[in-house]
Image (cartoon, rainbow, N blue to C red):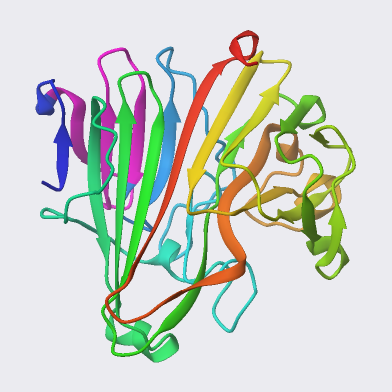
Amino acid sequence: MGHSATAWDQNSVLEVVKDWNGIDQVVLRVPRGASARVSLHGGQVVSWKNERGEELLFTSSKAIFKPPKAMRGGIPICFPQFGNCGSLEQHGFARNKMWSIDYDPPPLRNDDGKEKVSVDLLLKPSEDDLKCWPHCYEFRLRVSLAMNGVLTMISRVRNINGKPFSFSFAYHTYLSVSDISEVRIEGLETLDYLDNLCQRKRFTEQGDAVTFESEVDRIYLGSPNVIAVLDHEKKRTFLIKKKGLPDVVVWNPWEKKSKSIADLGDEEYKQMLCVDGAVVERPITLKPGEEWTGRLDISSIPSTHFI
């Protein structure tokens, strides 16, 4: 089914509502109180709350909630291009397109079988899309919320074209933090990274954690499948688990760049941090009939529980 729940009354945990532009949003809820909201515009997760109703994703106070522009915040899907690494618009077109609910998705292999509520979305190219990126594909996205509040996103891109094509990808995740200067990322130490502030020159991370004192815009390469974002003031840790996503993009615009971003408040860089599971350095190439899968699991736990 295009949306499903395990072990609960589906009507109580999944709801389709209209946003202020009349666009469908799917609301996922679990009995303990956690929730997530997914917009059909861009297939974008626009909200993820824990069981206490606390918003875990950042959304700019100046975000533009009107298609075709993607909302500044949540988790936009970057496909088939990340950033400006290609001929397409910034971060590709998937985040600006209308998706549909996928009522008959093919089964997921290696599904963990845990209790969760899910929605499946589908994106296919329009005739206009084929003019700027002439490749036929099916992009299936499953967004799930587990009983314990873990948010899972599984993307499947299939080549239904007669020739190979390549793409880059990212879950452009805007995390809500208390104060960026009090946040650290663990799991990226000793890794090589490409620094977008230095024409993508390659460096090696020297610190025992990634911390923030100025603008950061990096692509960490060959990253582990689990990293942690520690927010000391909120005593909260985001655990990010990923599969099929070898790179991690870390971005905070800091003060100067924030003032040049129209849909971001001048001081809001202090409350946000982007940590993206991504495929950037070595794009995925799919032959006809092949499929790629990229999975992201995000959980929020008290920092005292993190070892």
Residue ID at (36%, 66%): 97
Residue 191 is left or right of residue 264, and the answer is right
Residues in magenta, as a range: 12-38
The verdict on residue 289 being magenta is: no
Position of 151 relative to 237 (above/below): below
Q: Which quadrant of the figure has residue 18?
A: top left
Residue drawn where x is 30% and y is 20% of the image: 147
Q: Nearer the viewer, residue 122 or 292?
A: 292
User: Image height check: is 266 above or below 68?
Assistant: above
Q: Could you tell me residue 90's position as x and y percent?
A: 59, 70
Quarter of the image that includes the C terminus: top right
Q: Which residue is rendered at x = 38% and y = 44% of the image?
A: 153
Residue 129 visible, this orientation: yes
Front residue of 136/91: it is: 136
Q: Is residue 116 above or below residue 162?
A: above
Residue 286 placed where, x, y %?
40, 76
In this view of the protein, which residue sits in the foreground, 240 or 24? 240
Quarter of the view holding residue 292: bottom left
Residue 25 location in percent, x, y?
Answer: 28, 44
Is residue 37 shown in magenta? yes
Left or right: 225 in relation to 109: right
Any part of residue 177 in sight? no
Image position, residue 182 (x, y; %): 79, 24
Question: What's the residue at 83%, 37% (across, down)?
Answer: 212
